[in-house]
Amino acid sequence: GLGSPWVPRGALTAPSPQDWEQRQEEDTLLIERILLLVRNVLHVPPDPTEEQGVDGDASVHDRVLWALHISGMDDLLKFLASAQVEQQWALHVLEIISLMFRDQSPEELAALGQGQVAAEHGEDTRELETLRQRELAERRARALQRPSR
């Protein structure tokens, strides 16, 4: 109903679902309709005549994904995918996520993830080395300050 936390008010806010027993049938139908709408919007095939922009232009699919992100729908999908009590939506969410990544090759996604992991590892290594050098400098300073006997 109108008091349901699932009804979007402007932009979607962080999900605050009701307990399963308290959720009314119309709330369940509303959730399913929203998920089906998102799936159907993402399912629209690209139109080559519309996609002929400048090389840096985002495709219609990319702009839809950005709008879903700005609205918080991606957070809602992550919640529905991970919440034990929301398992009934798993196939809808899986289909939506599959459509979100439809233009990506698995190799590109894997390489992107590996590049991010390598960059984070390199950053951590540099940070540790900086801390180690600082600690060594502090030890030397303390050793020089001690009165020699």
Image (cartoon, rainbow, N blue to C red):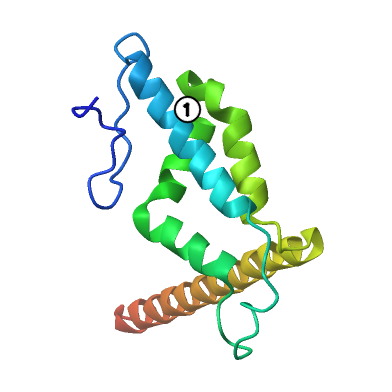
Instruction: Report x, y in % for residue 120.
Output: 57, 68
Choose between 30 and 69: the one closer to the eye: 30
Q: 10 Å neighbourhood of mark 1: few (<14), some, or many (≥20)?
A: few
Amino acid type of the residue that numbered disc 1 sits on in the rendered structure: Ala
| Residue 48 picture location, percent across and down | 70, 75
Q: Is residue 78 visible?
A: no
| Secondary structure beneath label 1 | loop
Image point (61%, 47%), residue name: 97
Q: Residue furthest bottom?
A: 54
Point 34% across, 77% down: residue: 142
Task: Give the side of residue 83 with respect to residue 1, left or right.
Answer: right
> What is the x, y in percent for residue 37?
50, 43
Question: Which residue, given by chain and number where applicable, does mark 1 sit on?
Answer: 83
Q: Is residue 118 above or below residue 53?
A: above
Viewer-nearest residue: 13 or 28? 28
Residue 74 visible in the snapshot = yes
Q: Is residue 58 above or below residue 4?
A: below
Q: Position of residue 70 (x, y in %)?
A: 37, 60
Instruction: Please name the residue shown 31% across and 33% down the image.
Output: 6
Q: Is residue 94 left or right of residue 35?
A: right
Which sits in the foreground, 66 or 120?
Answer: 66
Does residue 96 appear left or right of residue 2 in this picture?
A: right
The outermost residue toward the top is 21
Specify the quadrant that holds the N terminus.
top left
